[in-house]
């Protein structure tokens, strides 16, 4: 469970009202005022501290809960730092430019969004990491969309949908392993059972993306200008494939994501020192500040000027704030009160599945943390499913359908902030087009009970 124990037990109505207040506050600042997400999260954090003090909780306990909450995200913080280095090293080794150039070679205007969705899904399953998929092939595809005058919003929606299909269905995925472990279900049985709702969501999403794809999105001249500028960087070599191959092999052999990304980054950096003509001083500067392209063609320069540790500090600061806020919501008893209210009131299969999905979505919205939505909801509902005689496979599937895929749709969430930063497309812009992420919880809440009967 979450490493913070409540120091106060508020009534359910009080908890729900506070929940509505904080969500409304955050939504108003983000959507109504257009502020950066740090501002409303910090204000909500201060509001929760005030609430805790008013309820007799000492500031020391409140402070410790913020620290404990932030500490739970330290693994993600270090991973983000390595991803910043990965992007910059893949730029100077030519890996990302090569992926973009290869994509231009094989992808035309027909079914563009559908192809982006399908290819991203395949790579997502191979890598087992939604964020890595977005940060690598996702960056390449968003560059193609820019060159082809395609919709950045729909392209980002297709990238996010495919990446989180992979995050959900890959045996290498952290969330997939977490969901199966929390509810004690065999990993491959869990993946097989998820296909009952995931495959329909995938097929419907692909059809929608294919329909939305314009018949002609790019002129040959515009495409040739991009490809010429990419080749003119001097970064693309046959060795540019090596960092990608290393990353795929590392994930196939289930090497931890941090080590996989770090190894791929180091190898890419070593290759860049040979092929790019950059000095080691320049390379270390690029590790921190990212790569700055100077091809003379502004669209390509904008596309390739990315990466670096510095580019991740925005995301990291928000992750720390959001998880600190989550710790406060636990120590004040807000979340425990809401979660515990479900356990004794659910009897029907459909109501149990809907409540499971709603809880996972609610935790994503309130805390903005993908792993906590899976972990806390799983721990809370295990007793409910056992009492109702439901298989834990149903619980594991519901956790993924509504927990894993919703996080990128929350503007202040860990995944949402990261994706918006890497792709350069705000969450609220791509949200309506992330069809797979929207359909997954809808299908499980609408047909989950019926699917269970068919399965039996």
Image: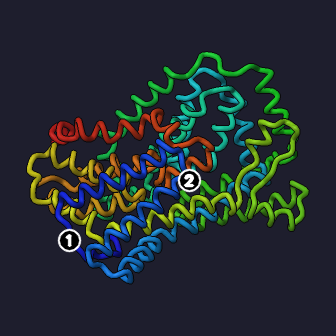
On the image, which quarter does residue 274 sit in? bottom right
Give the structural element (helix, strand or loop) at label 1: loop
Sequence-first disc among 1 and 2: 1
Label 2 sits on residue: 418
> At which x and y percent is residue 297?
84, 36
Left or right: residue 191 versus residue 67 is: left
> At which x and y percent is residue 237?
82, 47
Label 1 sits on residue: 9
Residue 190 appears in the rendering: no
Direction top: furthest residue:
215
**Residue in the image at 29% along x and 36% along y:** 443
**Residue in the image at 67% along x and 41% along y:** 140
Question: Circle 1: is it few (<14), some (14-19), or many (20+) Cα within 10 Å?
Answer: some
Residue toward you, 2 or 79: 2
On the image, which quarter does residue 182 sit in? bottom left
**Residue in the image at 15% along x and 39% along y:** 453
Give the structural element (helix, strand or loop) at label 2: helix
């Amino acid at each position: 469970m979450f490493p913070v124990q409540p120091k106060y037990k508020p009534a359910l109505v009080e908890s729900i009202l506070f929940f509505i207040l904080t969500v409304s506050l955050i939504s108003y600042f983000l959507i109504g005022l257009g502020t950066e997400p740090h501002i409303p999260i910090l204000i909500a954090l201060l509001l929760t501290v005030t609430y805790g003090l008013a309820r007799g909780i000492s500031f020391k306990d409140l402070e410790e809960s913020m620290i404990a909450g932030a500490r739970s995200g330290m693994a993600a913080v270090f991973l983000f730092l390595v991803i910043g280095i990965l992007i910059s090293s893949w730029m100077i080794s030519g890996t990302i430019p090569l992926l973009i150039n290869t994509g231009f070679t094989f992808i035309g205007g027909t079914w563009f969004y559908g192809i982006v969705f399908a290819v991203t899904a395949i790579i997502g399953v191979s890598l087992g990491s939604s964020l890595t998929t977005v940060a690598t092939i996702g960056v390449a595809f968003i560059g193609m969309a820019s060159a082809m005058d395609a919709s950045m919003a729909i392209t980002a929606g297709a990238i996010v949908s495919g990446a989180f299909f992979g995050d959900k269905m890959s045996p290498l995925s952290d969330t997939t392993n977490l969901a199966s472990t929390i509810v004690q279900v065999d990993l491959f049985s869990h993946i097989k059972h998820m296909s009952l709702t995931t495959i329909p969501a995938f097929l419907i999403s692909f059809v929608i993306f294919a329909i939305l794809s314009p018949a002609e999105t790019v002129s040959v001249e515009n495409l040739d200008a991009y490809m010429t500028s990419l080749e003119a960087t001097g970064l693309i070599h046959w060795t540019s494939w090596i960092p990608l191959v290393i990353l795929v092999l590392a994930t196939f052999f289930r090497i931890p994501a941090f080590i996989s990304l770090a190894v791929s980054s180091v190898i890419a950096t070593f290759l860049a020192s040979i092929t790019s003509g950059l000095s080691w001083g320049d390379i270390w500067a690029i590790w921190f500040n990212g790569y700055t392209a100077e091809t003379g063609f502004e669209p390509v320069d904008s596309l390739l000027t990315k990466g670096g540790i510095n580019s991740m500090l925005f995301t990291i600061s928000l992750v720390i704030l959001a998880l600190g806020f989550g710790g406060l919501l636990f120590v004040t008893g807000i979340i425990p009160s809401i979660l515990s209210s479900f356990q004794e009131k659910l009897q029907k299969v459909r109501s149990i599945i809907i409540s499971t999905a709603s809880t996972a979505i609610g935790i994503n919205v309130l805390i903005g943390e993908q792993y906590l939505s899976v972990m806390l909801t799983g721990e809370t509902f295990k007793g409910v499913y056992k009492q109702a005689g439901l298989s834990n496979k149903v619980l594991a599937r519901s956790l993924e359908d509504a927990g894993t895929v919703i996080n990128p749709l929350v503007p202040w969430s860990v995944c949402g902030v990261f994706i918006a930063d890497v792709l350069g497309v705000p969450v609220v812009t791509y949200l309506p087009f992330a069809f797979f992420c929207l359909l997954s919880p809808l299908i499980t809440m609408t047909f989950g009970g019926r699917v269970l009967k068919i399965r039996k």
